[in-house]
Every structure is written in structure tokens, then in C-alpha cells.
Image (cartoon, coloured by chain):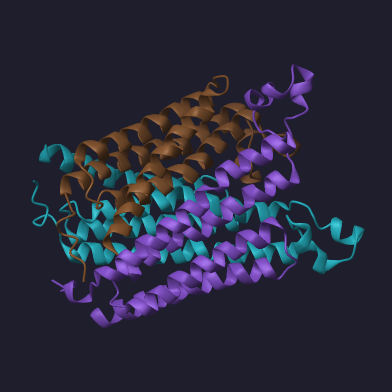
Chain colours: A cyan, B purple, C brown
Amino acid sequence: MLDLTELVDIEVTVAYVWYAVLLIVKMMLLSPLTGLYRVSKKAFANPEDAVGFGKGDNAKKFLRTDPDVERVRRIHLNDLENIVPFLFIGFFYSFSGVSLSTALLHYRIFFASRIFHTVSYLIPLPQPSRGLAWFVGYLATFSMVYKLVMVSLSMS
Amino acid sequence: MLDLTELVDIEVTVAYVWYAVLLIVKMMLLSPLTGLYRVSKKAFANPEDAVGFGKGDNAKKFLRTDPDVERVRRIHLNDLENIVPFLFIGFFYSFSGVSLSTALLHYRIFFASRIFHTVSYLIPLPQPSRGLAWFVGYLATFSMVYKLVMVSLSMS
Amino acid sequence: MLDLTELVDIEVTVAYVWYAVLLIVKMMLLSPLTGLYRVSKKAFANPEDAVGFGKGDNAKKFLRTDPDVERVRRIHLNDLENIVPFLFIGFFYSFSGVSLSTALLHYRIFFASRIFHTVSYLIPLPQPSRGLAWFVGYLATFSMVYKLVMVSLSMS
């Protein structure tokens, strides 16, 4: 039986929860943003959504894809692809015996990278702004994975 | 070092696990449902899937998008966008010192909202049925976020 | 108040973390793979991405969907739809009083099924290779759900 209690610093896990909540709220705000773009662009995916904006054939023409709506949807999917892995890895990482300052560094860099990713995707800023933002968050996650693997190997 | 043991009520976390499992099972059932719609509508995304339904050019015509298949896929993506945040927030929330009855209220409202969302998306019911269902679950999640922020502020 | 301490075997949770990290890394590798396919196929979703590959109208023609790029994106979405549920269910399952050998069996079967799913989707192998790979992982997850429900019922 392993003794993990010596590894656990509850302050790191509390810090994790704080950044996890911030990231989840940031990600969830994209749902109403998509709705806002759909209404302002009159571009809907479902007939029952378009029907409020016109009758019959008039409603049908609002059943379309719009580049700006699709852009927000891609931001949302990209957040799912990157923030959800962070939420798991960051949680495990908070039990890896890492110091509070090192953990905060990782959590803050990841959080900043996702904010900058969304901003540069939404405006949009010329590349490689968005690419770099994504890459910094990606690296921060893999840096935590590296620590987890090192701890795991030292335990066995 | 914070003392969180006084905050933890294991019965709340057990209640959380119960609703988490229900929501995950509900979300996972959309995978075979998509498959069912693809087969019954003969609308596939991959040539290797369509080939069983015809040879050569005949198979190619089944490589298409179908409105009903896309509808089920949007339900699945909407579940990912809403249920996954709940799974994290609801987990943190179960350690926030909340009473079992208040926690159950949140978990049940969220669960009911997602069932009603799927039903109103699938039939589909006229709007604002689906919109309201989504919004109730969204509010329940943010109500838990609010509690987490309040607890977090009172600790610091 | 339930006494869950007798159910917890930390070695099972450590095994869970190990497979969770492997699965998350596997899923995250699909992001650069999508980028690689986008660049090699010159098929982009955003004007700011395409602009590096040509000026004006020349760049516009690279704003397109490509079957191979879409294939990698479907693998990524399928991973989100299946691996994220596993990450939650497998975590709960590690606290269900299951033996290490039974847990490892589930974790390994699920991991192997997702590797085989990606390989058979990417090549692609003729069906039912990919379908079977998906189904084995799906069954492994539901086998863990079954155990959770059984434990839950025996506690109440």
C-alpha cells in the first residue's frame, strides 16, 4: 500500500479548483455567445429555431451556416478538446507533491493561454497568435503530464 | 493548511456520483442512437461504412449528411458542452459544505433539464421548449459555481 | 454516514490515473495531427490560417473541407464522446471496492479498444473493425457502470 498522504497539499488542490471553475465558466460562456451570433446573423441549425424569424419559405432561408457562427462553435469545440484534458491532468497534478508556486505557474499559464486563444480566434488576430496561444496551453498540460510520469516512475 | 474535513459530507458526494453516472449513461446512449439513425437514413460519413449498403457508385450516394442524423449529433455535442462542465462543478460542489437536500435539488434539476432538453430536441418540440430546458440546466450549474465562489472567498 | 474507507484501495486509483493520463495524451495527440493534415492537404477552416499559403483569391481556395482532415476531426470528437465518460466512470469505479486485477482488466481493455479504434479509423480498416473497437470500449465502460450500480444498491 502506497502512502500518498505525504504527497497531498490541500492548498494546491484548492488552487486547482479555482482555476478549473474559471476555465469552465469561460468555456460555458461560449454557449450563449453562439446563440447571440445565431440570432444576430439569422443562421440557425434547426427549423424550430428559425421559425420565429419568418414564416414558411422565409424561415427556411435562415437554416444556413454562417462563418462567424461556425467560428464561435470551433472555439467551443477547441475548448472542449483542450480544457477538458487540463481539468483531469491538473487535478491529478495537484496530488503529485508539486509546490503551490509551481502548480500556480502551470494553472495561470494555461488559463492565460486559453483566454488569449479565444480572443485571438474571435477577433481574429493574424496567425500565429492563435496557434501560439494554443501551443503554450498544450505545453503547460504536457509539462504536468511529465511531472505525473516522473512521480509515477519514482513510486514503482 | 486549510482544514477541509469539516466541509466534507460523503453522502453528498455519493449523491453526486449517482447523478453523474445517470447523466453519463444518458449521454453515451446517443452514440448508438446516431448509429441507428445513420443506418435507417442510409447517411454515412465514411466510405468504409457506406460500402455495406451498396457497391461502387451506389455506396457513394450514401456518403451524405441527413438532417435527422445531424440533429442527434448536435444533441450529443450539446451534452458534451453542458454535462461535462456539470460533472466537474457538481463534484467540487459536493465538497463545498452544502447540505444533502440542497445538493440533491441542484443535481435533480440539472438531470431533469438535460432529459427534457434531449426529448424536446429529438421530437422536436416547438421553441422555447429546448431553449428553456438548456437554460434551467445552465442556471443550476451557475448556482453551484456561485456557492463555490462564496465558500472560496470565505476561506481566504 | 457511510464508511467508504474500507472500499478504497489507493493502488486501484493510481492504476486509474496511469491509464487516464495515457488516454488523455492519446486524445491530445489528435490536435497536432489535425493541424498536420490541414497543412499537408491545404484545407483550412479560417481565412487567417489559409493566408500563409497564398494571397487573395489564392488563399480563399484553401478555405475548404477535406475528407482526410474531417476524418481526423471525427476521431477526435469520437474520443471526446467515449474517453471523457471513461475518465469519470473509471475514477468512480476505482473507489468501488473492485480488486486491482479486475480494475486493470477494464482499464487495459478500454485503452486497447481506443487505440485500435483510432488505428482502424485512420487507415481506414474495413468495417466492422472500427465498430467492434468502439463497442468493446463501450461495453467495458458499461461493465464499470454495472459494478457502480451494484455497489450503490448494496449500500442503501
Q: Decide: is A53 above or below B73.
A: below
Residue A4 pos. (x, y %): 12, 52
- Position of C81 with respect to A136 (left or right) is right
Point 52% across, 74% down: residue? B139
**Residue B156 in view (yes/no):** no
Residue A108 pos. (x, y %): 33, 60
- Position of C133 with respect to A40 (left or right) is left
**Residue C43 in view (yes/no):** yes
| Residue in front for this viewpoint, B108 or B133 | B108
Q: Quadrant of residue C105?
A: top left
- Position of A93 with respect to A71 (left or right) is left
Point 48% across, 59% down: residue? B83
Q: Quadrant of residue A94?
A: bottom left
Q: Decide: is C77 above or below B124.
A: above
Residue B107 pos. (x, y %): 43, 69
Give the position of the C terminus of chain B as an image quadrant. Answer: bottom left
| Residue in front for this viewpoint, A112 or C56 | A112
Residue C129 pos. (x, y %): 52, 23
Q: Quadrant of residue B49?
A: top right
Point 61% across, 56% down: residue? A72
Give the position of the N terminus of chain B as an image quadrant. Answer: bottom left
